[in-house]
Amino acid sequence: DIQMTQSPSSVSASGGDRVTITCRASQSIKNYLNWYQQKPGKAPKLLIYAASTLQSGVPSRFSGGGSGTDFTLAISSLRPEDSATYFCQQTYLVPQTFGGGTKVEIK
Amino acid sequence: QLQLQESGPGLVKPSETLSLTCTVSGGSISTSSYYWGWIRQPPGKGLEWIANIYYRGTTEYNPSLKSRVTMSVDTSKNQFSLRLTSVTAADTAVYYCARVDFWTGYSPFDSWGQGTLITVSS
């Protein structure tokens, strides 16, 4: 199975800050990388697919990048509603696998 | 607006079979651009993909669960289902059903149910 490793596991930042989350795959997954946001007690929500394509309706302060094994999710100007856990997912090979998650907290 | 709703027993005894159904509303399950899937999340932990199904019945399973999992689809009811046999405490999790956007070529889960907590306990 392809292992997806996210870092950091948690981050605390102030409103307006830029936050970057990293996801590393154990082998090349080209750009078959999706990002999700999950708030407590809620289902995950798709933010970005194909590493960098913003899902319809998602604010433009979210952006994704990378290819191969290294990927990033950036939040350009952190807002209170961005407090959540973020997961990456690879869909290059079966079984598709998720990263362990990064919890973003607002100071 | 597409909605997915999981239904299940809540509590299952060890060694028994878990059966879950996802009812899709606001859209047809018989759409060529989409697959339908199940994902689970143990309390306080990460996400694990279980299986996907196409409306014509083609399935894809996580090899780690394949021997215990069966997915099926009922297009007349706009539902799809999951059966997981021989459950143990390790199967305790929130189970989500979701739509897979196959048309993008990257198969993200673009619409999710609210999730249902399944506890395995005697």
Image (spheres, rainbow, N blue to C red):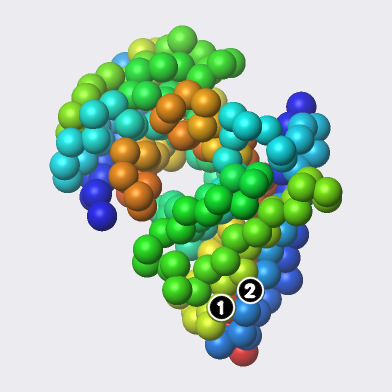
Secondary element at image label 1:
loop
Q: Amino acid at mark 1?
A: Thr
Quarter of image, res B26: top right
Which mark, residue B18? 2
Distance from Cα at disc 1 to Cα at disc 2: 6 Å
Chain-order first, disc 1 or disc 2: 2
Seen in the image, is A44 located left or right of residue A67? right
* Residue at 18% in and 36% down: A28
> Looking at the picture, does residue A95 appear above or below residue A73?
below
| Chain under numbered label 2 | B
Q: How far from the left and from the top, in percent, is residue A100?
A: 33, 49
- Front-most of residues A51 and B46: A51
In which quadrant is the N terminus of chain A drawn?
bottom left
Label 1: few (<14), some (14–19) or many (≥20) C-alpha neighbours in 10 Å: some
- The residue positioned 55% from the left and 37% from the top of the image is B100
Q: Residues within 10 Å of mark 2 (few under 14, many from 20)?
A: many
Q: Position of residue A29 (x, y in %)?
A: 24, 35
Q: How many marks?
A: 2
**Which chain hosts label 1?**
B
Quarter holding the C terminus of chain A is top left
Residue at image x 65%, y 59%? Answer: B72
Residue A98 % position (x, y): 36, 46
Nearest the eye: A101 or B60: B60
Amino acid identity at mark 2:
Leu
Q: Is residue A74 visible?
A: no
* Figure quadrant of residue A90: top left
The residue at the far right in this view is: B76
Examine the rendering and report whether any part of residue B37 can be seen.
yes
Residues beneath discs 1 and 2 located on the same chain:
yes
- Residue sitting farthest toward the top: A60
- Mark 1 and 2 residues: CB-CB less than 8 Å, in contact? yes
Residue to which mark 1 is pinned:
B85
